[in-house]
Amino acid sequence: MATVTDVKVRTGRRSELGLLGLAVAIAVLARGLVDYHADFLELDELAFYAAGWTVVALAIHLAIRRWAPFADPVLVPAVLGLNGIGLAMIRRMDFAYASRGRETDFGGVQTVWTLLGIALALLVILLLRDYRLLRRFTYTAGVLGIIGLLLPLVPGLGTEINGARIWISVFGRSLQPAEFAKIAFVVFFAGYLVTNRDTLALAGPKVLGMRFPRPRDMGPLALVWAAAMLVQIYERDLGTSLLLFGIFVAMLYVATERLSWVLVGLGMFGFGAVLAGTLFSHVAVRYTAWLHALDAEVYRSGTSEQLVRGLFGMASGGLFGTGLGEGRPDLVPYAESDFIVASIGEELGLTGLMAILTLYVIIVQRAMRTAIGTRHGFGKLLAAGLGFAIALQVFIVVGGVTRVIPLTGLTTPFLAYGGSSMLANWIIVGLLLRLSDQARRPEEVTA
Amino acid sequence: MNEPVRRLSVVVLAMFLALMVAASYIQVIAAGDLNADARNVRTLYREYGTFRGPIVVDGESVVWSKPVDDPFSYQRTYADGPLYAAATGYYSIVFGRTAIEQTENDLLSGTADSLFWTRLSDLVSGETQRGASVELTLSAQVQEAAASALGDSAGAVVALDPRSGEVLAMVTSPTYDPATLAGHDSAEVNENYQALLSQEDGPLVNRAIAGDLYPPGSTFKLIVSAAALEAGYDADSELYAPDQLELPQSSNTLGNYGGESCSANEFQTLADSLAMSCNTSFANLGMQLGWNLVARKAEEFGWGEQLSIPLAVTPSVLPDNPDDAQTAMSSIGQFDVRATPLQMAMVAAGIANDGVLMRPYLVDSVRDANLRLVEDAEPEEMSQPMSRADANELTDMMVQVVEAGTGSAARIDGVSVAGKTGTAETGTDERPHTWFVGFAPANDPVVAVAVLVENGGSTEGEVTGGKVAAPIARAVMEAAIAAQGGS
């Protein structure tokens, strides 16, 4: 005899609503500050903005209640908070550029991208009712990922901006297909690894007390390594290269639980990076600009100028920052996109930057928590992979700006100006919502 | 697979920790160095964007920052720019800073260590950083008198308060208007600067302290006299004073100014030699005393010293190991003896202050934006080149120069003036540089002055220190005495 017992589960939807309110408040207040310091504050316009955000937040809330009622309640508010701060900062850059006679509407465009991104995330939870469906498309995703990665190399389609060939122009807009390829690869890796993890986990020779994988199982790793090297050399994009390879190694480790894979992977990447640095001058220039950024000669050659200007900006912000709209972030090239972190460091100070980084930590940790709570191997790998993708991307960008690693051209998720990144990262949010919804949904208990 | 996910979370935390450490390093630990980096235009913008303190003379701002509506926020404004240019310098977005604007920049911009408490209290009370005001020792009356007396002639005037070392006047001519370099239109500023640079008479040069060094001519006889008094001579000591002095190891002879005779019997007292500015007697006296003694006396009065008032002063120079003939020429302030007008004012001040030379200084006090006293200059003894008795004896001799000698044009009614003229050959076909060095009142000096007029200035005909420089010195001393009486 089967009876359905009523199990009370805390979905956290009400906490989410409260947190969403906080995120909206941050977004609106930040914009209000920016407008105020630009002598542009019109209260009815700000009220309209606040109303708009409230509607969007409510829409997200209702959509999640309906389509993913058990989803993680912290994820979306954290992302929305970052997005709101990013929009305010980008609008602030519009004002800065305007005062120097350069008319831009990055803020307006980015608002559209944000709305599209949110729509895509909701579309994901609406259409994808079970993430396990994705596993069917493992190899399709792999092919899509490779196509996305190679698109910029297609003559006539790919465009080179600032020395990196990672863009394609579609309908007059520049897109970064690698941002989307990133998601496809995570799906592919998850599907591939969950199938082959047993083989890959087989022990091989023991070196220095540690079991290494069998050489014949090295094939996939070598392939991804080659792809990453190709990207670094031909698309001149160390960031994407490091990102893809890093995601793969991390997921490989999660799948096989073998640290030796990580060591082999890191060793291979390090070897490749050093090799590229010796063989290709454009790679070497980036390394020099990183290691000797402040040297008079390197600075004069212009290769480290952007980086150093970013450092100057952050230094001038100090502990508490100049205040939104009070600094001079426009003195750093690409202050609204690649260097938005430096702009935030300058105007919101170390305190603000720490808060931003903490928001990222929260997002990533929620993804990891989801991975742990998910019952299926594919889901675990997917959640961990997506979470690590965000973490690694932030690390690569912010690390580049703060001189932890060489500077690359990746965008800061949810913060930086750029449509591809905004859409792709909101899709990741959608996927994580779906994953966490399934992870936290109580199984129908039958007795 | 949960265990590796947990470990991955730890790796992620470590990655973010690395970012946080790097950000802290940049924004806190290395921030000072980065902010001070010369390539950091931000620092410049911020500096221009903060209220810069005024430069004050006699309680009134002669330089101040006026709020304006442009990216620089403030316009540096100069009242009487040309009059005070030598002291204040300029503050330019293109060419940086000079003089007080440069040396006191930390205080004016509000970043000096001594303003720490001010910054802290401003932070608490929500005030933005404001610079301190710098009050100069200059006296507006004396400065104006010096500038107007010097007029268009190229030259310099320095007036000191011999009791403290305060610089009462520092005038250099020709001068310029710092306002023309302080504008916010770089192209225009650049044009004005190039125009000043291309002027041959060098208006940007501060002749009083940092221009070319000048041969002091007969004013250097004060140093030789001081050395002689120390060596036991007195005012009445008879000196060998022929019409023509044969110079040792040389076929040349030295005569007096204009070929005049100092004495009917080839001998003259030290006092009268000074009053008449005999070349032959002092040249011979210098050789008798030996260059070492004269040079030591000069050094005690400041020759060779790297002074900072806080403007950097070019050290005055002496010849190295001159032979007898060169010693003779050096003793009348020719050959390789060179001095700044400030140095000559210090000679007068040292004698005036009973033989005690006070260190000259230009900054009287510094007050923060809340008018709290941050720095207050203390007069400081620099050296004692003469005994009180010798100084008083030399003073009496210098009074004779004005009362009965070459410096009669410096006489002031009712005040006894001490002085010495100088007419220094430049070694070229140009007219000689004319000097007057002196102080007043002789019995209780309130001002010591040195006047230099390059090549006799605009005076027509034959030029001498007595004719060209002495009247300027009189005007300056009168103004200083009046200013003292008034205060």
Image: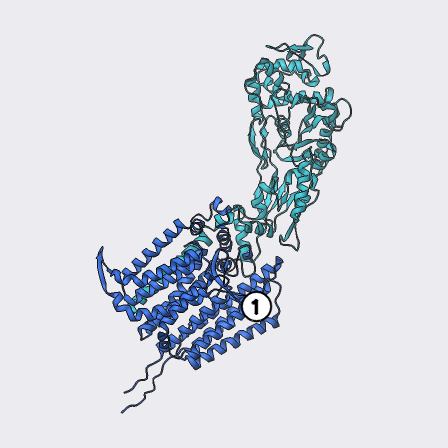
The colour of chain B is cyan
In-front residue for pair B379/B80: B80
The colour of chain A is blue
Specify whether residue A359 is in view.
no
Residue drawn at x 37%, y 61% as measured from the top left = A245
Residue drawn at x 42%, y 62% as measured from the top left = A393
Query: Which amino acid type is shown beneath numbered disc 1?
Result: Gly
Quadrant hosting residue A219: bottom left
In-front residue for pair A127/A398: A127
Query: Dividing the image into 4 quarters, which one contains the C terminus of chain B?
Result: top right
Q: Is residue B269 above or below residue B219?
A: above
Q: Secondary structure at mark 1?
A: helix
Specify whether residue B121 is in view.
yes
Residue B211 in the figure: left or right of residue A295: right
- Label 1 sits on residue: A108
Query: Dividing the image into 4 quarters, which one contains the N terminus of chain B?
Result: bottom left
In-front residue for pair A215/A5: A215
Q: Residue furthest right?
A: B460
